Each structure stands twice: as C-alpha cells, then as structure tokens.
Image (spheres, rainbow, N blue to C red):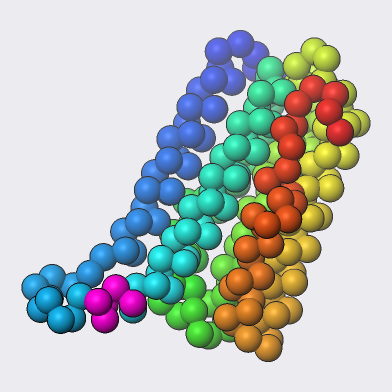
Amino acid sequence: MIERGREIERTIYFSDAVIAIAITLLALELRLPQDLASGEIVRHLVGLLPRLYAFLISFWVIAAYWMAHHRIFNCIRAYDGGLLRINFLFLMWIVLMPFSSSLIGGYGDLQLPFVVYAVHLMLATFTLSWLGLHAARNPHLMEPGVDPRSFRRQYSHRMLAMIAVFALAIAASFFSTTVAEFTLILLFVARPGLLGRRASRGVT
C-alpha cells in the first residue's frame, strides 16, 4: 500500500526524535565520580579521554547519518511497507549506538569491542543505503524530477566508500586498536560515503 501526503511527515518526525534521543544518550558516558579531591580531577579527566573519543566519533557519525536520512527523505514523497520496515531497522541500529560506543570507550584497548563497534556502523550504513536504494527502485515513491538511476548510483557508491573505511579499520585492529580507532577519522578527512554531497534531484 502506497501512502502519500502528510503521512510521510510522521515517519520523518519520528525518525528525527529517535536520532535526537540516541545522540543525546551518548553523553551519559561522560561523567566523573562524585566527591573527587581537587588533585584527582585531572587524573580522572585524562581517564575519560577514551570515552570522549568514542563520544566524538559516534556523535559525528550519527550526525552524518541524520543528514543523509534527511537528504533521502527530501527526495521521497510517498512510502510503502518496505520503506517503513527498512527505516525502522535503521533506527534500531541508531538506538544501539550508545551501547556500542560505550564498548570502545570502556574497552578501547581490546580488539573485540572495536570490531563489534565497526560492524555495527557497517550495518547502519548498509541499512541507510538500502533505504535510499529501495526508494530508487520504486519511482512512484520519489519526488517528480528525481532521477532514480542517479539516486541509486550515488547511494551505492556511498555505501561502498564507508564500508571500505570500516573494513580497513577492522583489518587495522588485528595490529593495533589505537591505529584502528584513528582509521575511523578517514570518514571525516576524506569525506566519503554519507559525508559526501547532497543527494539532490538528478545530482550524481
């Protein structure tokens, strides 16, 4: 069943709310023990650096996902059951982000928590790209003037670019988790994947 009009706005507003809550929950990991002596504050602040790193990476990754989600729905005028299910799957990965982020914040020197985090991001990236590809394969869901082939090609390239960064980070984790964590910065330095240009009408 195809739904149009204001019903699509409910999906957008709900998604925005879920993403906003998830991105806010990331900050709950950033706290100091109570009743610290003045001489202990600096030591505990230094101890928070791994959690701060996890917060910064996760915050900006979720922000990138939100921007891409916004751009996808800017090109969609209707939805079907498949689109809604894929969108809920994507939101499930977003809701789990504070959990996986806490893994690398608390156990950043271990490989398994990092691999879980990187695989989590790969799944979220794949699902968000799947959302865009589902819409592109069903032109009746798209706004007039959107070229489905360009739209589909763009999100295929973006998915592959981001998954390549995550795969590289996982490979690096077999040698050093520190190197693996900093490999994720490539997401922002090289601007691949979801950090690329706007998914606008007819733009490749």
Identified at 31% across, 59% down, the residue is 28
Residue 37 % position (x, y): 10, 78
Left or right: where 169 falls relative to 120: right
Left or right: where 67 falls relative to 46: right
Residue 89 % position (x, y): 60, 46
Residue 94 % position (x, y): 52, 50
Q: Nearer the viewer, residue 60 or 11?
A: 60
Q: Nearer the viewer, residue 78 or 194?
A: 194
Quadrant of the frame with the C terminus: top right
Left or right: where 44 falls relative to 72: left
Quadrant of the frame with the N terminus: top right
Identified at 51% across, 57% down, the residue is 58
Residue 161 % position (x, y): 79, 55
Specify whether residue 44 is painted magenta: yes
Q: Quadrant of residue 12?
A: top right
Specify whether residue 109 is painted magenta: no
Q: Which stretch did the figure color magenta?
A: 42-46
The answer to whether residue 168 shows anywhere in this view is: yes
The answer to whether residue 102 shows anywhere in this view is: no
